[in-house]
Image: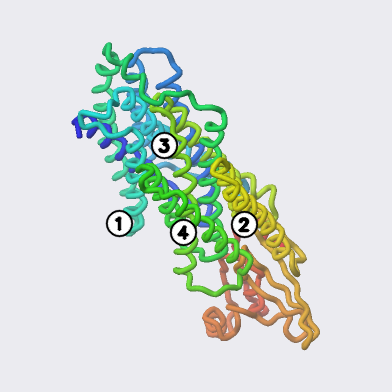
């Protein structure tokens, strides 16, 4: 490997590492202001994908659109890099405020203040450096194929996500984490400036005009460009949908969102390392198995499996689905001359997929239908990319698309069963179900968030004010309240209103104050 290739690889790797290291750091800084719900992270993901798109757009503009010399381009990039470094320094100890009444706007505003310019400049680095590297790529002299650098960048992202929960988060305060990241950004700035200024002489040499004419430089058609957009959009949509499903319906575990994100990044590393790692028909068969399994588990929510097994299954399903989507995307890669356009469409697809889950779905849907929509989208895309392989593939994936479409109606019936209220907002889906118990001839109502029960009330004269489920009198909280304070009035603070079961423990003179971040819960 040549020294220049090594410099490019180091800059791209470090840029991606810092890009994905700042995501959990920034997300954690929002937690005290907006809560730790999955919706906060999904909205952060929308911001990250949108900022990534902006970075890729800047890279495409600088590399392929603006008609100025290489030295001027390098100077522009260096100036913006210094601005990003200044914002990173100023944001180490910001005074942050947020509005829970407008959580989406708060997330976007806070992240723009914290990491806006650094995130955009880090996003632009990968496609911009790859574009400049591709102009001098000859396949010899120790140079690696340009698209292998994209796999390297995703490995850097993956390493950051592994390091954060295992080392940085437990051992360093948020301020220390920010300072470590800032120090890394200084090293990155030095490395990337070295790479771009070392390239100026090569890009301005007479040999540049010949190196642009690469083998396979056919201009992509509109069908290929559409798939450049739709395949990554589906992958991003599924990442957000699987994360939502795991956090709301399986387990509300801090930093759980990192696990599906690791699967998502692994799929890019796998796909962009070359077609020899993608036995197409084997992977398509495996995809069909996992799609069917996920669909079955969604129709049978009562299936009882350990949380670790459920999380592992869903993350493996996400990995396999995204490997197929991104490998098909890699098969459609253009000549390196069109690198920035290709990555720009990938970033645009990623932004659209996350926006569908983070911004559109909470407004349009009354329940969590986005995962099923992602499965339908996947089947339709595989039908499109395998259309020319024969009638058998067409019949298989057309049938799979129809089956997944039927699944969304089955899911709607399941959500509507016994529901007397079903609402959704930024913080998730809430349902109130009412069932009639024949032996006792009474109604029982239950509050459900996603698939997690948040309280039950039995509507009979003798049980109407009886604490139930995990608030019962023999539960931990039941015993704590009963043995507290003797006969003196009690002052109790409850974080999370739920169905208000804790109010049943109130005695004359007691004060029980409930805190809930979701404005729909007090209304219910």
Seen in the picture, residue 379 relative to 293 is either above or below; the reply is above
Q: Which residue is tagged 4? A: 315
Query: What element does badge 3 sit on?
Result: helix
- Please name whichever residue, 195 or 286, is drawn nearer the observer in this view of the structure: 286
- Distance CA(mark 3)–CA(mark 2): 28 Å
In the rendered image, which quarter is residue 62 located in? Answer: top left
Q: Which badge, 3 or 4, is on the more N-terminal residue? A: 3
Asked if disc 3 and disc 2 are in contact, CB closer than 8 Å, the reply is no
> Which residue position is annotated with label 3?
119
Query: Mark 2 vs mark 4: which is more N-terminal?
Result: 4
Please state the horizontal and vertical placement of residue 486, each as a whole percent of the image.
55, 85
Residue on which the image places disc 1: 167
Q: Look at 67% across and 53% down and name the residue there.
A: 402
The mark closer to the camera, 4 or 1, is: 4
C-alpha gap between disc 2 and disc 4: 21 Å
Question: What residue would you read off at disc 2?
Answer: 428
| Residue 357, visible in the rendered structure | no
Q: Nearer the viewer, residue 57 or 140?
A: 140
With respect to residue 118, does 282 lie above or below?
A: below
The image shows residue 61 at horizontal and vertical percentages of: 45, 22
Neighbour class for label 4 at 10 Å: few (<14), some, many (≥20)?
many
Residue at image coords 57%, 64%:
249
Q: Helix, strand, or loop for circle 1?
A: helix
Q: Earlier in the sequence, mark 2 or mark 1?
A: 1
Vertical order, 452 against 384 (above or below): below
Q: CA distance from mark 2 to mark 1?
A: 31 Å
Q: Secondary structure at mark 2?
A: strand
Q: Position of residue 34 (x, y in %)?
A: 53, 52
């Amino acid at each position: 490997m040549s020294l220049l290739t090594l410099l490019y690889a180091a800059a791209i790797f470090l840029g991606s590492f810092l890009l994905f290291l700042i995501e959990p750091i920034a997300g954690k800084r929002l937690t005290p202001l907006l809560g730790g719900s999955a919706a906060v992270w999904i909205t952060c993901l929308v911001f990250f994908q949108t900022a990534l798109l902006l970075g890729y757009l800047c890279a495409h503009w600088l590399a392929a659109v603006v008609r100025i010399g290489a030295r001027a381009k390098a100077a522009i990039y260096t100036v913006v890099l210094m601005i990003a470094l200044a914002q990173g320094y100023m944001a180490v100890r910001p005074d942050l405020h947020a509005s829970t009444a407008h959580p989406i706007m708060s997330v976007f505003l806070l992240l723009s203040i914290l990491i806006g310019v650094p995130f955009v400049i880090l996003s632009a680095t990968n496609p911009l450096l790859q574009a400049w590297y591709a102009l001098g790529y000859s396949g010899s002299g120790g140079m690696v194929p340009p698209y292998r650098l994209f796999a390297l960048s995703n490995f850097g992202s993956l390493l950051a996500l592994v390091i954060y929960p295992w080392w940085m988060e437990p051992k360093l305060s948020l301020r220390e984490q920010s300072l470590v990241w800032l120090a890394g950004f200084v090293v990155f700035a030095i490395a990337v400036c070295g790479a771009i200024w070392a390239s100026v002489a090569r890009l301005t040499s007479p040999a540049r005009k010949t190196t642009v004419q690469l083998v396979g430089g056919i201009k992509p058609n509109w069908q290929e460009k559409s798939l450049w957009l739709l395949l990554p959009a589906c992958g991003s949509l599924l990442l957000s949908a699987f994360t939502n499903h795991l956090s709301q319906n399986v387990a509300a575990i801090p930093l759980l969102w990192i696990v599906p994100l690791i699967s998502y990044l692994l799929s890019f590393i796998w796909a962009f390392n070359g077609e020899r790692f993608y036995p197409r028909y084997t992977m398509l068969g495996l995809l069909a198995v996992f799609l069917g399994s996920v669909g079955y588990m969604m129709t049978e929510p009562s299936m009882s499996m350990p949380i670790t097994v459920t999380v592992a299954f869903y993350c493996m399903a996400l990995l396999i689905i995204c490997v197929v989507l991104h490998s098909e995307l890699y098969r459609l890669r253009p000549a390196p001359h069109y690198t920035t356009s290709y990555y720009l469409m990938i970033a645009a697809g990623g932004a659209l997929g996350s926006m569908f889950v983070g911004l559109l779905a909470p407004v349009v849907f009354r329940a969590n239908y986005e995962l099923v929509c992602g499965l339908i989208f996947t089947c339709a895309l595989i039908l499109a990319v395998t259309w020319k392989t024969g009638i058998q593939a067409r019949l298989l994936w057309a049938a799979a698309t129809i089956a997944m479409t039927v699944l969304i109606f089955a899911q709607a019936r399941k959500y509507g069963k016994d529901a007397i209220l079903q609402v959704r907002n930024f913080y998730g889906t809430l349902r109130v179900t009412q069932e009639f118990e024949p032996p006792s001839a009474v109604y029982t109502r239950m509050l459900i968030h996603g698939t997690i029960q948040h309280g039950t009330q039995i509507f009979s004269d003798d049980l109407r004010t009886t604490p139930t489920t995990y608030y019962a009198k023999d539960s931990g909280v039941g015993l704590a309240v009963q043995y507290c304070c003797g006969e003196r009035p009690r002052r109790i603070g409850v974080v999370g209103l739920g169905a208000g079961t804790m109010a049943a423990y109130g005695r004359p003179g007691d004060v029980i104050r409930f805190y809930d971040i979701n404005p729909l819960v007090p209304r219910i």
